Image (spheres, rainbow, N blue to C red):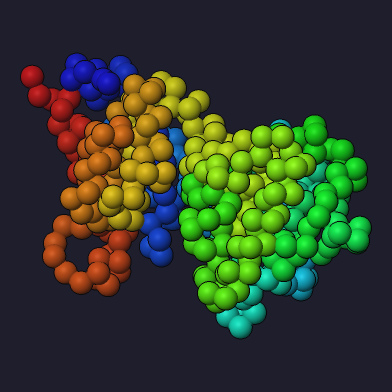
Amino acid sequence: MLSADELAVEGRGEHRMRFVFACDSFKGTISSSRSAQLLAEEACHFFPQAQTSGVEVADGGEGTVDAVVAATGGELRTVRVWGPRGKVVDARYGLLGGGRALIEMAAASGLPLLAAEERDPRATSTFGTGQLICDALDQGVRDISLAIGGSATNDGGMGCMRALGVRFLDVGGHELAGTGDDLARVATIDLSGMDPRVADTSFHVMCDVDNPLVGERGATYVFGPQKGATPQVAEALEAGMRSYAQVLAQAFTGFDPEAPGMGAAGGLGAAARTFLDAEVLPGVEQVLNLVGFDQLLEGASLCVTGEGHADSQSAHGKVVSGIAARCRRAGVPCVAVVGGMNADARELLGCGVDVLVPTVTDAGPIEEALAHAEENFTMAAERIFALLSLGGSIR
């Protein structure tokens, strides 16, 4: 961290401070990129000679592809694929350069693609997600990150693997479609037709849940209801998933259905780890890897991050805690600007955040705070850099 003397000489142009800005979006009010612009304006007002670097970040959920594509100068590619119920949909993913791609499974197999009356995990499939992977391989990609939140499926990842050439066969040797209904029918797995490019590709699964594949905390019982499963349907799907897990255990040495994260995305987590030998990482960690955040921190004087509301969840796998941890490892001070916070937000101070700065300055209804979000954010940025400037004049 810079000393008071170093802060003082910056004001005389003898030292150029460098600030890094990396906020999550303040949902519905300020985008990640806009927050960086506002911070840069206030920083340069107090430190005219400063260098600023802004980068869009996300935690692996909705909007991650857009943020990472923007941060890396990549491109969005749209592909026509099968949706979760077999209807053709236009799904986007990101080509990031350097043979890398980022795919959100929700773009092809997500719950928002279905109307409420269409949601039925017995009939849905991840086939479209597999089609996106195939298209990325066609583009020469050999490093694929797969964000697996927001699924409409409970097929154990069979649909995705079928798109890559795997065949799931019943006792009569007939190939199954790979929906949730087919879990109980799988007798053998034929890997002979697996796309050979898979073996030459590195896969990374962005996953923030630790649920196993089966059991009370497994894919079916925890996530099935939101996908349309009644208690009776869930019972049948769980029986099918247990049967499917036994087949996987026979086909793959060391397969463990109780391992954390296997139940993510209706079992796609298990399939990705088993068939694709995927590395599993928290969403924010892989996002920071993809945007080269550690390199961005090199030589930085200060990093400012932030999110809309800080609470007990903020210290566990969210953008602010992920950035703060990397700042701590790099020896870079970290300030977090938050739209609001409760007492539990202080957990962030143990993750590497040095100071928490709320944007709201007066009591009032939430609607008023949201309406003035950008104004409040700007004032918070002004306070940060005013205090930093003041530190340089204190002897």
* Residue 344, image x, y percentages: 22, 49
Question: In the image, is residue 266 above or below residue 324?
Answer: below
**Residue toward you, 80 or 151:** 151
Question: In the image, is residue 288 above or below residue 122?
Answer: above
Total residue callouts: 0
Q: Quadrant of the C terminus?
A: top left
Residue visible at 72% across and 46% down?
248
In the displayed structure image, the side of residue 74 where residue 356 appears, left or right: left
Residue visible at 21% across and 32% down?
388
Residue visible at 44% across and 22% down?
298
Which of the 4 quarters of the picture holds residue 326?
top left
Residue extending farthest to the left is 395
For the question of whether residue 282 can be seen, the reply is yes
Residue extending farthest to the bottom is 117
**Residue toward you, 8 or 379:** 379
* Residue 292, image x, y percentages: 54, 31
* Residue 267, image x, y percentages: 63, 54
Q: Quadrant of the N terminus?
A: top left
* Residue 358, image x, y percentages: 22, 51
Residue visible at 25% across and 66% down?
369
Which of the 4 quarters of the picture holds residue 114?
bottom right
Question: In the image, is residue 244 above or below residue 351?
Answer: below
**Residue toward you, 269 or 337:** 269
For the question of whether residue 75 can be seen, the reply is no
